[in-house]
Image (tube, helix red, strand yellow):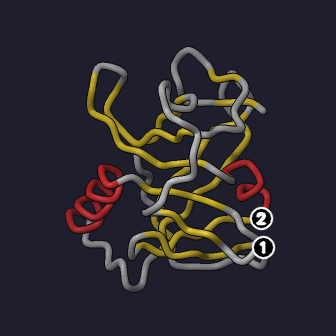
C-alpha cells in the first residue's frame, strides 16, 4: 500500500470547539472524522498523480503503535476490507478504518499544511493529550 506523508498536531489553537458544519462524516455509531478542503484537494491530486481510481480505492486511516509518544497515524490507499473494518464517505472519498483505530480517531480532522511547521498531512485529534516534538506520534 503506498504511504502518504503524515504529521500530527494538537487541536488548533483559537478554535471555538464547535462541531464543523460541512466536510464531516458521521458513521452509524456517530463516529466523526473530518477532511479539510486543503487535505481533500491534496488527496485528490495525489490520487491523480499516482493513478489511483477513487471509485475503486479507499483511503485507509489507521493508528498503530510507534513513535516516542506511543501511537502514530498511518495513511494510505487500500482496496481490501478486513473483518473489523468499517467504511464511510467523506467528500466523495471512501475512508476505511478498523474498529480500534476508530476509537482513537473519533472527532479528528485530517488537514494538509505546507508551512513552517512542515509539509504534509496533519491530524488534529482532540483526544491526544501528548505529542512528540517531531509531531509524528501522540498519546492518550
Q: How many marks?
A: 2
Where is 13 relative to 51, above or below?
A: above
Q: Position of residue 80 (x, y in %)?
A: 58, 79
Q: Which residue is mark 2?
A: 99
Q: Position of residue 21 (x, y in %)?
A: 47, 60
Q: Position of residue 7 (x, y in %)?
A: 47, 35
Q: Residue furthest bottom?
A: 55
Task: Assess whether mark 2 and mark 1 are in contact (beta carbons under 8 angstroms).
Answer: yes
Q: Quadrant of residue 114?
A: top left
- The structure residue drawn at horizontal position 36% and vertical position 77%, both measured from the top left corner, is 54
Quadrant holding the C terminus? top right
Q: Earlier in the sequence, mark 1 or mark 2?
A: 1
Q: Quadrant of residue 41?
A: bottom left
Secondary-structure class at tag 1 = loop
Q: Position of residue 88 (x, y in %)?
A: 57, 75
Q: Which residue is mark 1?
A: 84
31 or 99: nearer the viewer: 31
- The structure residue drawn at horizontal position 20% and vertical position 63%, both measured from the top left corner, is 49
Secondary-structure class at tag 2 = helix
Where is 42 relative to 90, above or below?
A: above
Amino acid at each position: 500500500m503506498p504511504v502518504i506523508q503524515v504529521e500530527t498536531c494538537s487541536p488548533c489553537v483559537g478554535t471555538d470547539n464547535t462541531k464543523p458544519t460541512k466536510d464531516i462524516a458521521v458513521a452509524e455509531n456517530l463516529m466523526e472524522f473530518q477532511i479539510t478542503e486543503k487535505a481533500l484537494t491534496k488527496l485528490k491530486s495525489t490520487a491523480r498523480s499516482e493513478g489511483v481510481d477513487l471509485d475503486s480505492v479507499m483511503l485507509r486511516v489507521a493508528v498503530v503503535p510507534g513513535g516516542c509518544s506511543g501511537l502514530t497515524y498511518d495513511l494510505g490507499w487500500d482496496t481490501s476490507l478486513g473483518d473489523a473494518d468499517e467504511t464511510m464517505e467523506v467528500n466523495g472519498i471512501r475512508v476505511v478504518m478498523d474498529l480500534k483505530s476508530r476509537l482513537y480517531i473519533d472527532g479528528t480532522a485530517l488537514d494538509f499544511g505546507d508551512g513552517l511547521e512542515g509539509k504534509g498531512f496533519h491530524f488534529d485529534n482532540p483526544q491526544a493529550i501528548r505529542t512528540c516534538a517531531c509531531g509524528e506520534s501522540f498519546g492518550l
